[in-house]
Image (cartoon, rainbow, N blue to C red):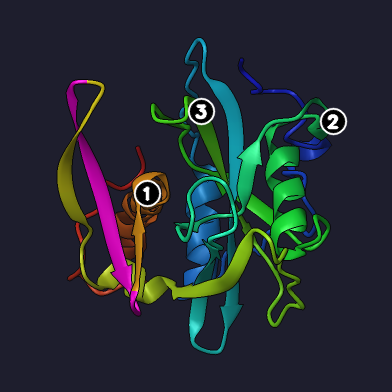
Amino acid sequence: MSREGTGEHEAGGRLRGGAEPARSVPGNLKDGITEILRQRTARQADRPGFRQAAVLLPLYQNESGPHLVLTKRTDLVPTHKGEISFPGGGYEESDGDLLGTALREAREEIGLQPEDVGIVGRLDDTATVTSRHVVRPFVGFVPSPYPYRLEPFEIERLIHLPIAALLCGAPFREEVWEREGRPVTVFFYEYDGDTVWGLTARILKQFVEVVGTPLRERGLLPLEGPPGKGDQ
């Protein structure tokens, strides 16, 4: 089921979800990320028999630079116990579109109100064979500080990942697993004692590949760092 063109953009080209994205100011990492994502056309995947889902990559800026917000799930949930993830979940008809799904889930899981999210773009759709979902990742900036309210059954705590550490720090680790009789590359990323892996690590790695090289070309990151593929 394709949701492209179903209202994720408001009239005039503004992405729905709250405040206008910041204008680009040379030398600013936040604005560089915003410009790259707004200019990029994300790939859309149609996988028959797969459910549609969406996640939100919340970004915020403070005195030390931009950060991504991830969640650590509790051991109470029926699936993905204790794993690191982005706020998100499966599409529901009442959402209207997949952006609505990402915003609803972020509100339910961490108390992030839709009107406080300034959507700047999205990444490529990512399919997961294990749960048979096609996941659409949206990226948006949120205020900082923010009064997050965690859903206690689902979310144990938040993880605040500095973008500079992600883009210039240790690379992702890879392992080859067997799924349904075929080899599958599984990615892992370590930060401050937490391990991000699976679908979330794939989305995180895509974010690095999409924004890393363009930011270096703009002089907003050191030339050294994990390799990135740039705009895909």
How many marks can you see? 3
Mark 1: few, some, or many residues within 10 Å (few <14, many ≥20)? many
Residue 54 in which image quadrant: top right
Upstream in sequence: badge 1 or badge 3 = 3
- Residue numbers of the magenta segment: 181-193
Upstream in sequence: badge 2 or badge 3 = 2
Residue 135, percent from left and from top: 52, 34
Residue 218 is marked as none
Residue 115 in which image quadrant: bottom right
Q: Secondary structure at mark 1?
A: helix
Name the residue located 59 percent from the left edge and 46 percent from the top edge.
55
- Residue ID for mark 3: 133
Residue 146 in which image quadrant: bottom right
Residue 211, percent from left and from top: 39, 55
Residue 94 is marked as 2
Q: Secondary structure at mark 3?
A: strand
Q: Nearer the viewer, residue 139 or 28?
A: 139
Residue 104, percent from left and from top: 77, 47
Image-based side of 54 in relation to 93, left or right: left
Whether residue 6 appears in magenta in the rendering, the answer is no
Name the residue located 36 percent from the left edge and 52 percent from the top edge.
201
